[in-house]
Amino acid sequence: MKAHTAVIILILLSWSWHECSAQDIWSLERCIEYACANNLSIKQQSLEVTRSENQLLQSRLSFVPSLSASVGHNLNWGRSVDLQNLEIIRNQLSQSTSASANTSIQLLDGLSKLYSLKSSRKSIDISLQEVERLKDEISISIVRSYLQILLAKEMLATSQENFKSISEQRDRTRLLVEAGSQPYTALLDIESQLAAERVQTVTAESQVTTSTLALQQLLDLPYSKDFQIHIPEIDGMLSSYHGYSADEIYASAQNLPVIQSARLSLDKGDIELKAAKGQYWPKISLSASYGTFYSSSSYSPSGTAYPFFEQFRDNINPSISIGLSIPIFSNWSVRTNVRNAELSRRSLEIDLKLKQQALYKDIQTAVTEADTYYRKMEAALANVNSMQESFRYVQEKFNTGALNGTDYTVARTNLLKARSEYLQAKYQFVFQIKIIDFYKGLPLTL
């Protein structure tokens, strides 16, 4: 019974370990999602969204009338004035207490509050677009780093395969040398090539480690040797490529955050220009107050002491007032503000055009480089096939002793170079395809 229990526990532990191992595999989508949720720059920009929301709330509350209240108590001696009958009081200590409440609201202010409200709403939209822009930038960086790891892993696999093949060839060469079919120098040549390939393998391993570290740094994760990424199947996108139109991609890229943010900033500039022109308008304000007071030197009509609360009741003094302010001359400050707002608006319009222009150039570059790397990849693949056939022929002649080790080494080096060029062209092409997908508004996946 105990043995069965132990077996069950081992099975569960093994299953849990495999589950944990599977969860440690990082796909491209998981990397992007994690970075967007945990990147400090994105979190910092998200604070700007909250700050803009606070400003929007303040802009809304500016339409509510202001309200204030005050209470004061005074001690007077020497000469003072009786607040009730305005008689002069000499050399007598007197006390007075006053209380009031005041409220005011602007009825006409050149629509400055309305424009401020609209501007605050635009600020929120701009902040949100800036958050998305940062997410896009970190996503592109992650795609580049992710593909660099895939390239490094394929280069390592190729190097390990070559090292194994050369090791096997070294063993065959030793037998041929011992049989007298090859000179001893052939064995020395193959040993030298094996040592060089060992260096290449170590270099490839180092490149995998460096590329993995770069991705973990992008994710703000501590370095771990156990960090593993998902190896996707990318040959499908290599065969389905038929070219792209830069104009079509540019049309679909107008909703990117970098363009939307520039458009919203221009809209905000229009609002701020209207707000500046609103300073030419007259301003009308409405205010009301409600107050009362008590004075120790006051007496009732019958000549007796005037109680505190009775004075507060009898001395109530409400008031309502309307004020009109007409700007006539303000040292050209309003005119200067309007001109500066016009200049800012023109600058924002140029900034939008510059970003659209830069976006179109980037798309043109991506489309051109995708075509270039695709043709380069096809040419490199044809070269690999040719080099493999050539190397097979050289290897057969070398095994029969009809070819020396130097020619064999040259043939193998050429094959390795051809494979390296193909892998680099392939992943450069895949990266450009992902860039184009980004401009088209498609999710970044592999």
Image: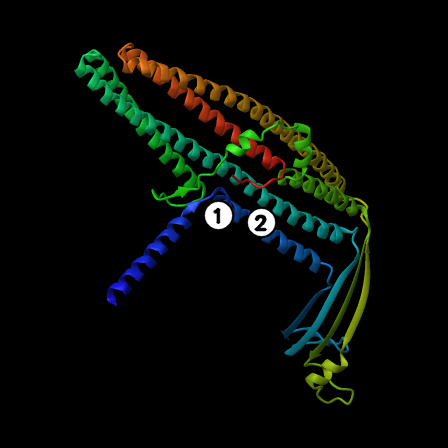
How packed mark 1 is, by other alpha carbons closer than 10 Å (few <14, some 14-19, many 20 or more), is: some
- Look at the picture and state if 170 lies above or below 338: above
- The residue depicted at 39 percent of the width and 19 percent of the height is 415
Residue 24: % across, % down: 40, 48
- Camera-near label (2 vs 1) is 1
Q: In which image quadrant can residue 219 be found?
A: top left
From the viewer's side, name the closer residue of 201 and 400: 400
Q: Is residue 58 left or right of residue 209?
A: right
Residue 276: % across, % down: 75, 44
- The residue depicted at 77 percent of the width and 47 percent of the height is 279
Pointer 1: what residue?
34
Pointer 2: what residue?
48
How packed mark 2 is, by other alpha carbons closer than 10 Å (few <14, some 14-19, many 20 or more), is: some
Q: In which image quadrant can residue 54 be found?
A: bottom right
Q: Secondary structure at mark 2?
A: helix
Tell which circle, 2 or 1, labels the residue nearer the N-terminal end: 1
Q: Is residue 402 left or right of residue 287?
A: left
Q: Is residue 184 left or right of residue 311?
A: left
